[in-house]
Each structure stands twice: as C-alpha cells, then as structure tokens.
Image (cartoon, rainbow, N blue to C red):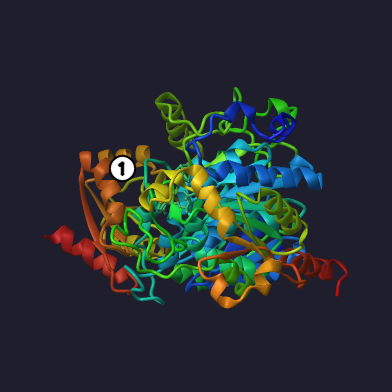
Amino acid sequence: MAIKLMQGNEACVAGALKAGMRFYAGYPITPSTEIAEISAEALPKVGGKFIQMEDEIAGMAATLGGSLAGLKSMTATSGPGFSLKQENIGYGIITETPCVIVNVQRSGPSTGLPTSPAQGDILQARWGTHGDHSIIALYPSSVKEIYYTTIRAFNLAEKYRTPVILLLDEIIGHMREKIEIPENDDVEIIDRKVPTCPPEEYKAFKVKEGDIVPEMAGFGTGYRYHVTGLVHDETGFPSGNELVADKLLNRLIDKIENNKDDIVTYDEYMLQDAEYAIISFGAIARSAKAAVDHLREEGIKVGLFRPITIWPSPDKQLLELGKKMKKIYVIEMNAGQYFLEVDRLAGKHTTVEKYGKINGEIITPEDIVSFVKEDQNA
Amino acid sequence: MPSGLVNQYFRTQNLAHIWCPGCGNGIVTRALVKAIDALGLDKDDVCVVSGIGCSSRAPGYLDFNTLHTTHGRALAFATGVKLANPKLNVIVVTGDGDSSAIGGNHLIHAARRNIDITTIVFNNNTYGMTGGQYSPTTPTGDKGTTAPYGNIDAAFDLCNLAQAAGASYVARGTIYAANQLEKNIIDGIKNKGFSFIEAMTTCPTYYGRKNKKGNAVDMVTYLKEHAINKIAWEKLPEEKKVGKFVIGELYSSTRPEYTEQYDRLIDSFKKGV
Ligand SMILES: Cc1ncc(C[n+]2csc(CCOP(=O)(O)OP(=O)(O)O)c2C)c(N)n1
Ligand code: SF4
C-alpha cells in the first residue's frame, strides 16, 4: 500500500495513467496547468505522447485524433479554454470518439477571476456544444475520489464511445490530501471493443446485436473507414436522409440516457431519517457535509445528497428526494445552475431553495448552516 | 483517370460526388491518388484528413483511413493522428479558407513543428461551400458575395507563409499542369517533415461567375497562361512577373521531424538514459 500526499490535479493524472492514458494534447491554463505539466513528464516514460498545442481548439482536435489512432486520450483545461473546446467536443460526440476532458473550473464569464474557484460550468458541460446530444460529466469531491473518478471517466468513455467531462474544483485540484493507492490495485479498466471481423465486413458505425456501441478500429489497423461530423449511416458516410439522421442522433442520446443505471453514481449522507436534504457536489459538498453535522446537533433532521455523476442527471433519485423531503436546499458556487435540474425534478413534489456564491469565495459550513437556519425560521 | 485507379483507390459506391460540373477539385484529388499510387503506399497506412469545405469532401470518396473534421481544424486533428501513430502517412486536404483563415493558426504551428504531414491546399480563391464569399487568398479588388464592391483585403501568398513558418517542403501547382502537381505531391509525401503544396484550382460556380472569369475551360486557360515554372520565373525581369505566379518546387530543406524527435525521447527512457 502506497500512501501519498497528492494534489488533486496530480491524482487526476495518476488515475488517467492507471486507466491507460497514452495521449495528451492541451494548452496551459490556470488552474488546470499541473495536469498538462505532470502528463508531459510522465507520458514519454511509459511510451505515451504529450503535445502542447497552439490553443484549446487544437488541443481538443488532437486529443480526438490521438483517440482515433487508437490511444486513450485526455485533455485538460479551465474556464475560457473549456469554451474553446466546445465545437470539437460535439465532433467527438457525433463521431463517437472516446476521450476525457478535464475542466478544472474557474470563475467567469470571460477571464473572470482566473485564480478563484467557481462551479459555473455545470450547464456548459451539459449544453456547451451546439445541437441535441447527451453527455457524461462526473464530479469528484476529494483527491482520492479524483483518482478513481478519472479512471471511471476513461472507462465510461471507452465503454460508451463518447467524450466524458470531468469537472473539478480549483480547491481540490490544488489541495493536497493523503491518498492510498494499493500496489496491486485491481480496479476495473475498460478498453474500447475493436473489430475482429474481416475488414471488408466492417461497418464502422453499426451496433452489433447485444452491444451498446459500434466496435472501433484504430486508424492504421487494416480497417479503412470514414469518420465525419456530418450525419452518417452505418458505414460512416454522410447522409441527408431523415431516417438515417433520426436513427443516429437518437442512438447517440439513448446510449447514455438508457444506461443511467450503469452511469449514474452518487453519495448519500444522513438521508435515512432526514426531513430536509442538501444537494451539493465537488468541494462544496464537503462544506455541506460539515453543515449537516452541525445542523443535526441542533436537532434539524437534514441529510446530504451528492451527485458524482452530474450528467446524465440522477433523475430517479432526485424525484424520490422530492417526494420524501419537506424541502431541498441546492448549494453550489454559481447562481443556481444545478438548482434548475433539481427544481425540474424534485420541484414537482417539494420546495427547492438555492444558495450560491459567484464572487470567488468558498461556501463555508457556516454559510450553509445560517442559510438553512434562517430559512427554517422564516 | 484510368478506371483501374478508380477501382483501386476510390470508394466507388460513394462516387456520386457533390462537386459542380467544371470544378477543379476532382483534378487535384486525382493528382493525389496518382501520387499515392506512384509511391506504392499501402492503403492501410494512409490517413487523409480534411476540414470543412467543398475541397474537404475529397477524403470521403477515397479508400483510405479518412477523417473529415471541423472547419479549419484538419491539421490539429492530423497532428493527433500522426503523433499517436507515426507509421501512418498523413495527408491533409483543405481549402484556402479552411487552411489559412479559420485554420491559419494550426497551419503555422504544424509547419513550425515540421511534423511529417503533407498538406494540399485546394486554392480556388474563395469560400466555395458557403457560396463565394471572399477568402484570405481572394486577390485584392476581386469580388465575393461579401465583397460586392471588390475586396480591399490583401491576399496571402500561402507558400511564403508556410515556408516562413517552417515547412520543410513547399510547392505550388495548378490543375492545368496536373502532372507537375502530382510530382510535387510525390516529393511532398516523400519529405520527412511538414510539406505544403498549394494547388491552384477553380470554382467556376462562384468565384468565376462573380468575377466574370468565363467558364471552366476559360479559368483553366487562365491558370495555364499565368503560371510560370520556377526556372523560367527566376530569369524573368520583375516587370514581367506582374500578374503572374510561380509554380513548381519552391523550397526544400532538411530539419528534425517532430514525431521522430518525440520517439527519440521515448527511447531515451527505455535505455534508462
Ligand atoms: C466554425 C465554422 N464556421 C463556418 C463554417 C461555414 N463554412 C463551411 S465551409 C466554409 C468555407 C470553405 O471555404 P474553403 O476552405 O476555401 O473551401 P472550399 O469550399 O472553397 O473548397 C465556411 C465558412 C463552418 N462550417 N464552421
Ligand atoms: S462551389 Fe465551387 S468549389 Fe464548390 S464544388 Fe462548386 S465549383 Fe467546386
């Protein structure tokens, strides 16, 4: 058992390497830069490739290129860089190219408060690229969880052939915590399914019976096929046919939305007998947990629901909470983004209140305690 | 084209191509295929990457590993593909707008890295796919749908740009002198480094019509009459160069190639250096 003191950004690279990352392309930006720096140092030692591209658009493009050539690929960015990546994230979605995009969030819009934390990209992660689509976005809340969630991000990317977004908080990205990584960590590693049929029978975008996604051949492995961001048929060729479009675009949404039971993960704390729920994620969920303890001491029956999978949303669980709770408090470092999702679901059955900060200051347990108490006394 | 080559290198089932009658794109694509054939490359080892535009549709018709990406980003995707799998012969097919407007940044950086990618720009002096707006290579004074009174921008000399940015092989050809273009593509692919080939082609539908350049044949004749071979060009007095342009191999040099450098780095760890 190796016990290490690690920064969140470091744990992210460690998890990525464990998952099999062999390609990284990106552009430096605070507070994600360490992920690039550590990848640059580590990758050539394991035969992998690192490249610093000329901007984030290129970083996203090269990441997808690396994946199409067969390597597990990742890029990391923050704030403005995440905005720049959006068009090519959509390309990754429609071409079903697995990769991991880490977004160590920072305050915005624009350059905002470059070194201050924020959780303001919840909706950009969901809807940042144009057009109808689904997406997987994960949100860990400790250094250890960053390690395991990064592995999971790669696994989901490979399994569902899609870009997976890993949302991190600056606070945890830069925080050092002790983490234990077992020497022979037998954590599950998933690799994309590659074709074994004769090349002439390969249909690059046809889903085989019993599979979730098409088998994916790396460029140069003898399966020559076409990849395009245009709507395409099962062979990969562009098509303007509405039936083809219907089938492809719905399949891309369904492969994620119909597999929520596999994709969605969350954490619950003191919810068993709770009358009130706090919903919070990432670094702020840690403040929320401390607030729960404090409020319990004062006799308020409150618990914490912490989504780890932000998208697709844990809709079943949110609906259930709505039915059970007298009230739900959504606490997030933005002006109420995840609140919209909670209110859409739980709001059918109960009152949902929001509390947020957008000035770069962390939400503390005391902030949450006084917010809840004031609301209860109101 | 001899039908043997069509059957061998084109996805014949997809050959109802989108290009207009008289478009020059087919001639450039043919020169590319003939170059690949002459080099005897294994189709499995060729990856053709493009951006968005009429010209960027070419890879879809070709039986290689083909990647039709986003507008301007072909070189950035291609850089990922090449670095991840250096044994692939990576060829980028792009338009003048795709490569030098929206994709200009990627062009200069791919050239700077001298990464072993051969880029062929189909320069028709306009944005064909979107209906004939002016591009960074539309000559000053010429018209586009967004330059109804004549373009006041200065045009890029793409070959100078690529050379200055660090390309180790630079050539220009025309669809009239297609054999020479093919030869330049062969040399570009052979070059271990970033190769840049500007193929002067025609868009009779938009650029031609808007600028009263006549029909497709007139436009090819124009290319024939205004392109001057490098050797002749060098002997030409300056005043005779006005309105003309030079074709042929314009520059070549040897300098370290990006993916080889990276592989050397990896090897240094294997040897425990
Ligand atoms: C991000 C983005 N911006 C704009 C467009 C619209 N668009 C498609 S092709 C094109 C211009 C293509 O011109 P060029 O690269 O010269 O290629 P051609 O069609 O002339 O071969 C434009 C502006 C787009 N597809 N994506
Ligand atoms: S619009 Fe111009 S460039 Fe496009 S296919 Fe037609 S002739 Fe060719």
Looking at this view, is A165 or A329 the one in front? Answer: A165
Q: Residue furthest left?
A: A378
Q: Quadrant of residue B1?
A: top right
Residue type at mark 1: give it: Leu
Query: On screen, B199 above or below B165?
Result: above
Q: Position of residue A42 (x, y in %)?
A: 70, 68
Q: Is residue A135 visible?
A: no
Looking at the rendering, in which quadrant would you find the C terminus of chain B? Answer: bottom right
Residue positioned 71% across, 27% down in the render: A200
Q: Which residue is mark 1?
A: A321
Q: Tally the marks.
A: 1
Image height check: is B77 above or below B105?
Answer: above
- In the image, residue B2 lies at what x, y percent? 72, 32
Observer-nearest residue: B165 or A180?
B165
How dense is the environment of label 1, judged by Cα within 10 Å: few (below 14), some, or many (20 and up)?
Answer: many
Please name whichever residue, B22 or A323, is drawn nearer the observer in this view of the structure. Answer: B22
**Residue A182 visible in rendering:** yes
State left or right for residue A12 relative to residue B113. Answer: left
In the rendered image of this protein, does residue A252 appear above or below residue A355? Answer: above
Residue at figure coordinates x 47%, y 72% from the top left: A31
> Chain under label 1?
A
